[in-house]
Image (cartoon, rainbow, N blue to C red):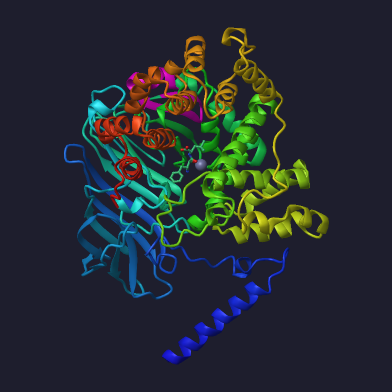
Amino acid sequence: MNNLRYLITFLLFAFVLVSCRSRKKGEISTLKKVDPKVWVDEHTQSNADSVQVKHLHLDVTVDMDHKQIYGSALWTINNNHKQKELVLDTYDLTIDSVQVDGKMVGYNMDAPIRYLGNALRIPILENSTFVTIFYKTGAKARALQWLEPQQTHDKKFPFLYTQSESIYARSWIPCPDGPGIRFTYTARVTVPKGLMALMSAENTDVVNDTGIYHFRMTQPIPAYLMALAVGDITFKGIDDRTGVYAERGMIEKARWEFENVGIMVGSAEQLYGNYRWGRYDVLVLPPGFPIGGMENPRLTFLTPSVIAGDRSLVSLVAHELAHSWSGNLVTNATWNDFWLNEGFTNYFERRIMEQLMGENYSDMLWELGYQDLENTVIHLGPKHRDTWLKLDLKGRDPDDGLNDIPYEKGCHFLKMIEIAAGRDRFDRFLMKYFDANAFKTITTETFLNFMDTGLIKNDTILRKKLNIDEWVYGPGIPKNCPRAGNELFGKVDAERKKFLTGTQPEALLFVHWSAHEWLHFLRGMPDTITIAQMKLLDNAFKFSVTGNSEIADMWYLLSIRNNYTAAYPAMEKFLSTIGRRKFLEPLYSEMMRKPATEEMAKRIYNKYRLNYHPLAQESLDRIVLKTNSI
Ligand code: BES
Ligand code: ZN
């Protein structure tokens, strides 16, 4: 038996070797030859793809004082493949007991695997239907951020929110935690009286006086879209299907900023078909939220740093909204296919912004994105494996492989196809793609096959033009990568040049510049400029005290680089109030690059570390404290 296994392994190995060697340029890659419908998700230990997991009923209490969620997760299953056990993912959960069809059973918890957590093994029979796990969360729950009143905007009540993507749902629910496994859910959540609870589901818009909230999500979603927030939250409608949730003291500003979200949903629908999730609301979180936004179905979670006071950063909402199609409706089967979620969404986001603001505006987004792509490739190296669209995250936390490649290389790939095929033809194809794959999880290869039969067909000239293999299974930026015309940025470049050759800032032609033009103005500064020049800019344009987080972030980067110490107090304030890793990581990294600012980085980090989300702490610990906490 063993010998046979060795022989098969050897033959397989030899086959792969031969087929790799004999691969000529332009031939389809070996990776593409695997059955696109069969995939291995390296980041879940669950077997729920073979035991059909259909529905979750969650009945939990949120204990704000002890920073713990406890209760039960009741899974409805269909064991028609006659598995002997149901394996679920858990991370730092304490399991109190397990019942199958109402009867207590013995169960096993495997030893923990670093970021994957412990597999929970529950014995089941052929006709088992209900599996209930009684559990509580641990202190190291990576999805949860428990905020003291002091860490919220209003500073009066505690706050809790979850961030389940990519593989953190398992740290607050025992679940099959892979994007390729979908289920519907209902929930009963008990919270301290007076606080509101919200989920990625049908929500209430008023605080009730029992502290018990009921939720229902009737469309199947993967575990990474499970979400919960609890706090002193209030609601203001935008139109009859959109609205804003935020802390009381934030709601007016937030409502104003998101005035056009209702129109945005309509605009997205015009592009790729009906919005299928009923309501679209957004929730503005306290400042510690580690990312810009999270596309939790029906209820996008947002950083407050998007509220610039002038609606200049709402493309972030367009992005999260676009995920209602790309990601939530058609989902990447594994984290190696992450570009299917984020590349499509970036493309879709820019199409929405083009419809709302015009082509000149969306061209700025495209150009800034191209710059991000270029910088990421330079940073990683042009041959780096992480610059392929199809990732290989085996043996790694998907969070570690997170960079701009899936986003920017992904959306530029789609833009290139749009240009080659023609916009109308490509749009018709995408509409079909979302429709045919709605509520499904797909691999990169399924998409490529779908495109082959649905778009390229017999058009060999088009196929050749696209150069798909180089994009998907190759590194760097392919030669046919499009770059947007940049009429507006051309003007910005000219003004920057004038400044660098001695023109006073006040004499520059900057009236009506948007946040993106300012961002480009700063990004294009040479590696070093003088402190006197920094001062001139600051006096004229008040960059150190800007309310726009993107501009502030870029300005503080320049300040560290050029030893412009006058901006440091404002930067410290920024670092104390913001939780977004996109801003924190570059700033701390830049400070750590030279002795003069290294000490400052450590001092500031130690002071505000606990304000940051556990995941932000993990990556910043590595940058500032040079430790590895996981
Ligand atoms: N789904 C992502 C957030 C995410 C990705 C969380 C991977 C955890 C792991 C979300 O849609 C996103 O992309 N957010 C961006 C904003 C966007 C405008 C690029 C962010 O948070 O910066
Ligand atoms: Zn996204």
Q: Which residue is drawn at the image coordinates 21% and 47% (left, top)?
A: 139
* Magenta stretch holds residue 290: no
Image quarter for residue 459? bottom right
Q: Which residue is drawn at the image coordinates 60% and 18% (left, top)?
A: 500
Give the side of residue 320 with respect to residue 147, left or right.
Answer: right
Image quarter for residue 318? top right
Give the side of residue 163 with respect to residue 404, left or right.
Answer: left
Q: Which residue is drawn at the image coordinates 36% and 48% (left, top)?
A: 186
Out of 502 and 441, give the one closest to the viewer: 502
Out of 581 and 274, give the one closest to the viewer: 581
Q: Is residue 65 above or below residue 572?
A: below
Could you tell me how many numbered marks the image carries?
0
Q: Position of residue 462 (x, y in %)?
A: 79, 54
Q: Position of residue 321 (x, y in %)?
A: 53, 37
Q: Is residue 588 above or below residue 140?
A: above
Q: Which residue is drawn at the image coordinates 24% and 64% (left, top)?
A: 99
Q: Position of residue 469 (x, y in %)?
A: 67, 59
Q: Is residue 40 above or below residue 10?
A: above
Give the side of residue 498 with respect to residue 308, left or right.
Answer: right
Q: Is residue 476 above or below residue 623?
A: below
Residue 274 can be seen, yes or no: no
Quadrant occupied by the N terminus: bottom left
Image quarter for residue 511? top right
The boundaries of the magenta stretch are 236-254
Residue 519 can be seen, yes or no: yes
Q: Position of residue 307 (x, y in %)?
A: 45, 23
Out of 383 and 37, give the one closest to the viewer: 383
